Image (cartoon, grey):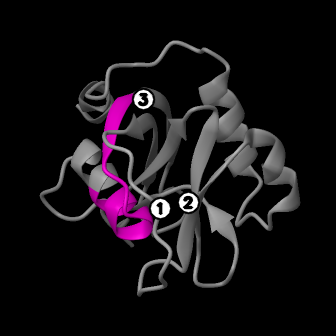
Amino acid sequence: MAAEPATYFVLGVVERRGRVLLVQERDGTWYLPAGRVEAGEDLVSALARETWEEARQLVEVRGLLAIEHSPALPSPRGARWRFVFAARPRVDLPPKAEPDEHTLRAGWFAPSELERLRLRHHEVRRWVALAASGRPLLPPDAYEFALG
């Protein structure tokens, strides 16, 4: 059985004045702006689109924090690539306040506030801490080398 083609996802740690942007998912949990990359879309554009759809924020990507790869074998599902970017708002807009088909709302949170939120996954705290650590970022287009 042949493996499915690889699937690509983007996540954004969007920071503004010491606070991080989170979106409230349809199930009530909080997560980073994230989503699947659409056919023909580059990763930076995918993050900009997802952040606009989910949080109504225009972002400037600062750099690449991490690349995760889950190989397809032994599963036939296909490989999964996740690209975690550090970003900042391009303009000062209020976050999304009205629910739609993407998310319920968005908000800015201090890292210390993440403990009281019902997060979709504990990795949110890890990515926020990594972005705040001062770790050098790869250029936003560094993924081109990873994908060959």
Q: Nearer the viewer, mark 2 or mark 3?
A: 3
Q: How many marks?
A: 3
Work out whether 133 lies above or below 127: above
Q: Are marks 3 and 1 in contact (CB under 8 Å)?
A: no
Query: Which quadrant does the N terminus fall into?
Result: bottom left
Please report the residue visible at 43 percent of the width from the left and 55 percent of the height from the top: 79
| Secondary structure found at label 2 | loop
User: Furthest residue to the right?
Assistant: 116
Residues 95 and 54: in front is 95
- Residue 18's spot in the image, x, y percent? 64, 32
Q: Where 138 falls versus 121 (above or below)?
A: above
- Magenta part of the chain: 49-62
Q: Secondary structure at mark 1?
A: loop
Callout 3: SS = strand
According to the picture, the residue beneath numbered tag 2 turns out to be: 74
Residue 128 lies, in percent from the top left, at: 66, 38
- What mark, if any, has residue 70 been given in the picture? none
Viewed as shown, does residue 15 lie left or right of 138? right
Rounded to the nearest angstrom, the CA distance separating label 3 from label 1 is: 23 Å
The verdict on residue 55 being magenta is yes
Q: Residue 109 placed where, x, y %?
A: 68, 49
Residue position marked by numbered label 1 in the rendering: 95
Could you tell whether 79 is left or right of 31 in the image? left
Tell me if residue 143 is in the magenta stretch: no
Q: Residue at x 40, y 19 (%)?
A: 138
Mark-to-mark CA distance, 2 and 1: 41 Å
| Residue at the extreme left of the image, as rendered | 40
Instruction: State the image coordinates of residue 137 (x, y, percent, origin top left).
Output: 46, 18
Q: Which residue is mark 3?
A: 64
Q: Is residue 42 above or below residue 102?
A: above
The residue drawn where x is 22% and y is 49% is 45
